[in-house]
Amino acid sequence: MHRKGRGDCRVPENNRLNGISKDYLDHGDQSVVCEMCHAKLWNDEATRGKRKETKVTYSLCCHNGAVELPPPVRPNPEYEELFKSNTAKSKFFLKNIRRYNSMFSFTFMGGKVDASINKGKAPCVFRMSGQNYHAIGSLLPKDGAKPKFSQLYIYDTEKEIQNRQTIFRDTDADTSAAEKKLDTEIIIWLKEMLDRQNVLVKTYRMARDVYNQQPTTDLKLRLICSRQQDGRTYNLPTTSEVAALIVGDIEESFEPRDIVVNKVGGKLEYMNELHPSYVPLQYPLLHPNGEDGYRTKIKHRGVEDDDGNKRPYTTMREWFAYMIQERVGEFSKTLYSRRLLQQILVDGYTMIESERLCFIRSKQKELRFVTFENLRSLKE
């Protein structure tokens, strides 16, 4: 998942002086384009090109044409300008993008972020320790507790802006009055944008409306895991596909990876990394429409039947490798998100490792059989 840029220097040891390179190694421009997925690559990344269906493809971006995903949904022009322009508003937004994302995130990360490493004027580093996971709380906070994360979409929404600023306050004591005003304007604008177009936000707002009309009703929210649409074509689900409101007792059966969020309760629900809403719930600013993240059963290009295919589906590693590429004619919010990009790369790495460990645990019989067969063939 590491991308080499122009500033990534690789120089011989004898060319270094006191740990600082005397020379600057320029990798040049991204002059190579994958003819299958249109990813832009540096020459050093394009050493393993293959020809498939008369097109030159590469393993780094789309696994030599095997991975086929829908293009990202283009944000509205005003939101795109926040990532690309050089205005004071854009600079302030990008400087605080991790904070803004935490304000509107539905879930929280279990790993401990090491903030002590970012001191001085060196480039920002995102470092996390401990076990990482995403957890989601109940629809409403306990009596006397302050709302957090997804609860901010339902509880005390008359003071929603103030609540979000209070919980995720800026620790910089030198913030000027103009920056505080700009901060409030950005938060209000982001809230209104997500209310208009994010299917997950709309679902929680529906839960808020039901709660306001019937405060004593036993209300639950089911976050649905399964998707009926082809993952190679559609990545923008409807509200009914991502979640369902449940009033009263639960009578229908759920899939194992579905998440049922209760109205009130101290128990946190841990989300499975394979849930399609795992990434958009944590990163609403990178998925402003609530579009799906990684999900299982996304078939490789050209695969229509599982029979005879050893690996017919896109893996999580392939999905992340595809999504972090810069492509011709596309705008990637993720690649422009600076410190939030660092966070999602670290988060994605832990997701990939977690999926690998889960695969090893669940496939012990098959793995032992393969190992035994290999040992027997060597003995013979």
Image (cartoon, grey):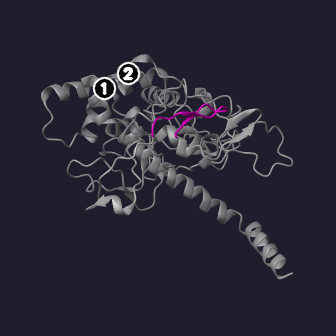
- Note whether 324 is above or below 213 in the view shown: below
- Structural crowding at the residue carrying mark 1, measured as other residues with C-alpha within 10 Å and reported as few (<14), some (14–19) or many (≥20): some
Q: CA distance from mark 1 to mark 2?
A: 7 Å
| Residue 154 seen in the figure | no
- Where is residue 74? Give x, y as percent: 51, 23
Q: Position of residue 269 (x, y in %)?
A: 50, 50
Q: Quadrant of residue 244?
A: top right
The residue under label 2 is which amino acid type? Glu
Sequence-first disc among 1 and 2: 2
**Which picture quadrant has residue 335?**
top left
The residue singled out by tag 1 in the image is 90
Q: Is residue 210 left or right of residue 91?
A: right
Secondary structure beneath label 1: helix
Expressed as whole percent of the image width and height from the top left, the position of residue 167 reads: 28, 41
Can you identify the residue that label 2 sits on? 81
The crowding category of the residue bearing disc 2, from other C-alpha atoms within 10 Å (few below 14, some 14 to 19, many at least 20), is some
Q: Is residue 310 magenta?
A: no
Which amino acid type is marked by label 1? Ser
Residue 338, position as x, y percentages in the image: 37, 38
User: Which residue, as the protein is rendered here, is positioned at the far front?
Assistant: 14
The prevailing secondary structure element of the residues shown in magenta is loop
Q: Quadrant of residue 149?
A: top left
Disc number at residue 312?
none
Q: How many marks?
A: 2
SS at badge 2: helix
11 above or below 155?
A: below
Identified at 45% across, 61% down, the residue is 131
Between 133 and 84, the one nearer to me in the picture: 84
The segment highlighted magenta reads 28-42
Taking 232 as reference, is 119 left or right? left
